[in-house]
Amino acid sequence: MIPFSPPKIDQRIIDEVNDALRSGWITTGPKTKLFEKNLIEYTGSKQVLCVNSATAGLELMLRWFGLQPGDEVIIPAYTYCATANVVIHCGATPVMADIGDNFNVSLEAIERLITPNTKAIMPVDIGGFPCDYEALNALVNRGDIKAKFTPNNEKQEQLGRMLILSDAAHSIGATYNGQRTGSVTDLAVFSFHAVKNLTTAEGGAIALNLPEPFDNRAIYEHLCITSLHGQSKDALAKSKKGGWRYDVIEAGYKFNMTDLQAAMGLVELARYDEETLTRRKHIFDSYTEAFSAHDWAYLPIYETENKCSSYHLYLLRVKGATEQQRDQIIQEIFDQEVSVNVHYQPLPMLSYYKNLGYKMEDYPQALATYQNEISLPVFYNLSDAEIQTVINAVVTAVDKVMG
């Protein structure tokens, strides 16, 4: 069976994790701090804080911005549940927007949904393809949109507009207008989960790029405290001679990354462009070349004049397929020993959000996209022979089900 997305674990990863184990630092320590430094250099961000998941990073930044009941956050209806869940955790309301024809959120839909209660917009780089950040940044800075913004704390007054918090869980290494994701808007949060391009088993990172007069370094230092129970010193700081005493200055969270996780990240980041992205692009290009010969194939967009994906998910769509036919195609592919997936079930289809009153018919593009989407295997060790096996399995399955 060809798997869908196994992690890349080789001797370099094992050696670096063993080095962390032998060092005695298995919680947040020198490797985590080095990983943060390397991520700043790689992304071009002003500051980076590593955390234990992208979900934790998104929630931490919404809470930092002071989200409260009655506030609204605009998110795409087509995303993983974490994007919405963190808004719920903060007591605020997720306001769902439909998507465009490239899986990412529709700018026109966002603009229609903005109200005086809107505090933040959370675009999602689905599959690793960046959203239109130039247009998003221009939208929230437009005079009539800024006039709708009603701040309720000092940070919101200082920003003077809606926050753009990018859910960049899929898109580390992607570029927009020549800049890497993480540096193109106020805040971005990456995921290093086991199935992501760059994995630390579990983990994530917050990229800080807030405009003046915000001090991104000072915010980073405060977030270090908030992400560790509000404790004024982490384990590394307390290990210094005479440094045992600490204070707790707020009721914080347990969101810190460990050095065991960062050890994996250090290896993966060092070879990310040369090895990981290069191989994933080859897989994407191979799929596109093969499926472009078939009229039923709706191919994903992953490179344009000003955008380049991180090649995280190959989101193939089968033109004209119903949801039932799509599911039959998936079963036929599995029967040929190839694993595939679907990204994603739109949020209003999920019981929790359906029970809150969200209706799938309000998001026709998200529904149409979901109904015929199939995600194909993309991972570093997928061989050229296996790529051809995937292609053959998909073509055979579609021909069998669609005729």
Image (spheres, rainbow, N blue to C red):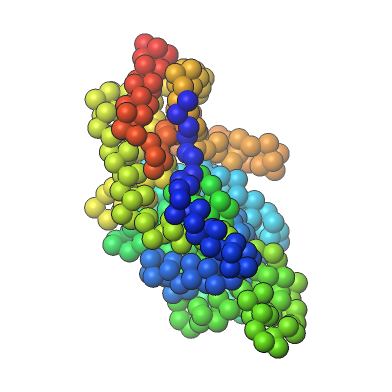
In depth, the one of 388 and 99 nearer the eye is: 388
Q: Residue furthest front?
A: 22
In depth, the one of 109 and 381 nearer the eye is: 381
Q: Residue at x 68, y 54 (%)?
A: 88
Q: Residue at x 27, y 38 (%)?
A: 285
Q: Which residue is drawn at 68% across and 80% down?
A: 238
In depth, the one of 384 and 61 nearer the eye is: 384
The image quadrant of residue 243 is bottom right
In this rendering, the answer to whether 195 lies above or below 218 is above
Q: x, y (%) of residue 194?
A: 53, 47
Q: x, y (%) of residue 254?
A: 69, 64
Inspect this view and state whether residue 120 appears: no
The image quadrant of residue 381 is top left
In this rendering, the answer to whether 300 lies above or below 188 is above
Q: Which residue is drawn at 27% across and 56% down?
A: 306
Number of numbered labels in the structure image: 0
Q: x, y (%) of residue 76?
A: 51, 48
